[in-house]
Image (cartoon, rainbow, N blue to C red):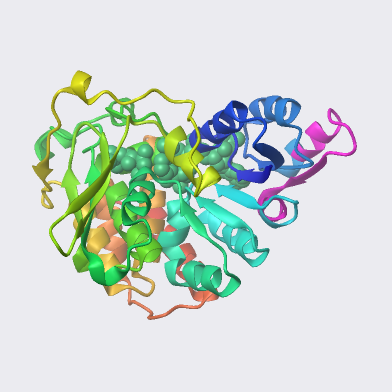
Amino acid sequence: MKKLAILGSTGSIGTQTLDVVRAHPEAFEVEGLAAGNNIELLMQQVLEFKPSKISVGSKESAEQIKQQLPAHIQVFYGEQGLIEIAAGTDADTVVTAVMGSMGLPSTLAAIDAGKTIGLANKETLVTAGHLVTARARQKGVQLLPIDSEHSALFQCLNGEPRERIHQLTLTASGGSFRDRTREQLKHVTVADALKHPNWSMGSKITIDSATMANKGLEVIEAHWLFDMPYDQISVLLHPESIIHSFVEFVDTSIIAQLGNPDMRVPIQYALTYPDRQQAPSSRLSLAQIGQLNFREMDYVRFPCLSMAFEAGRLGGTAPTVFNAANEIAVSRFLNGEIPFLLIEDIIADALQQHEVIANPELEVIYATDAQTRARASAFSVL
Ligand SMILES: NC(=O)C1=CN([C@@H]2O[C@H](COP(=O)(O)OP(=O)(O)OC[C@H]3O[C@@H](n4cnc5c(N)ncnc54)[C@H](OP(=O)(O)O)[C@@H]3O)[C@@H](O)[C@H]2O)C=CC1
Ligand SMILES: CC(=O)[C@@H](O)[C@H](O)COP(=O)(O)O
Ligand SMILES: [Mn+2]
């Protein structure tokens, strides 16, 4: 029986993780759940999965739900609450499925407590990849990828040493605006941007897919997860999201991982690794699909991807800046404050003004993240 704690249990990844648990009640037990504001859904999850500890976003919510729950369920809140669920339960595996670099302290706490990490929260690896991976190595903790491309690469690599690898290629769907020109992008709406062609996901990552910042974050995530230099990581446009990514070996052989776009498959693989079980998902029929398409990536059309490569190559605090600026810009777009194309302007401005600090300590990462957020929040075209 595997014991789980889920950070972000009410979100897209969190609820699909619970679908996997529901499909294998004999294999998993839920020890801890952490959510933000969706108290109603969290309460349903508590009744169904019976964790011993839960956490919510605010003190008020925590006090309100304590009155409705039996005393043996401990209720926490805020950042300390997330840390308690990450590190303070009997769970052996922690699924990190909150959105953004706010997941960094709890991810580090889970690693320090020796938990295996099912890693969905890519922003933590982007903002502080050197610290997260070094700490995981030091503690002998496995970082098992949940992100579909990284799960694919992990499966294709299958432990092969670096000297046998020629290139990792991440596939990109192109997001909601794949076929629109830059001129057309000036007038797109939030509702349009939230219509991803293949995946149903949280709103922030759906916007990231539309700007291609998601693929940029994923390039940096792949660099840290697989210890690969940036010139051996590439991106290919693949509108169908059936090939989730592939590895080309030095002998020219390519191994790819395919499947329907369904996150429950990579989530389950991270939870059962190295075993495989029947997933609560439909089987892929290539005969029914008939045709798969590929296109060279257009870095002029998608400047967020070029900026992510640049930030990754610069290293140090540059990826922290890329991530923090993007998080603020996306939140401002979702709030209707700025047009879509300003997202990339905000990231470009943040990167341009930043003097990169090499090999930053955790405190430097937090300070850089906060400074970048302040600048990105104040950015205006006027
Ligand atoms: N969705 C997907 O298919 C994929 C997602 N990812 C990554 O996984 C992560 C999660 O994405 P996704 O599931 O789409 O995001 P969602 O927005 O759907 O979910 C975010 C989760 O975080 C919770 N949360 C928000 N604020 C807090 C807080 N202050 N304290 C505790 N919990 C909080 C939310 O709670 P509440 O709703 O209760 O407020 C929710 O449970 C992201 O890093 C994303 O990039 C990676 C690959 C695919
Ligand atoms: C499901 C998943 O892993 C997302 O990160 C997905 O990859 C988004 O798709 P695109 O960024 O390729 O549009
Ligand atoms: Mn992905």
Foreground of the two, 240 or 27: 27
Q: Residue furthest bottom?
A: 358
Q: How many marks?
A: 0
| Residue 338 seen in the current view | no
Q: Residue furthest right?
A: 71
Q: Residue furthest top?
A: 288
Residue at 47% x, 42% y: name it: 269
Q: Position of residue 374 (x, y in %)?
A: 44, 60
Q: Which residues are magenta?
A: 62-85
| Residue 258 seen in the current view | yes
Residue at 83% x, 35% y: name it: 66
Residue at 62% x, 51% y: name it: 93
In the figure, residue 204 lies in which quadrant? top left
Q: Position of residue 183 (x, y in %)?
A: 10, 37
* Relative vertical location of residue 117 with respect to residue 355 in this rendering, above or below: above
Is residue 80 one of those drawn in magenta? Answer: yes
Residue at 68% x, 49% y: name it: 78
Q: Quadrant of the N terminus?
A: top right
In the figure, residue 148 lies in which quadrant? top left
Q: Position of residue 134 (x, y in %)?
A: 50, 73
Q: Position of residue 119 (x, y in %)?
A: 49, 51
Foreground of the two, 234 or 369: 234
In the picture, measured across the screen, residue 116 lies left or right of residue 247, that is right
* Relative vertical location of residue 30 with respect to residue 246 in this rendering, above or below: above
* Relative vertical location of residue 135 with respect to residue 277 in this rendering, above or below: below
Query: Splitting the image into four quadrants, where does ligand 3 fall?
Result: top left
Foreground of the two, 333 or 87: 87
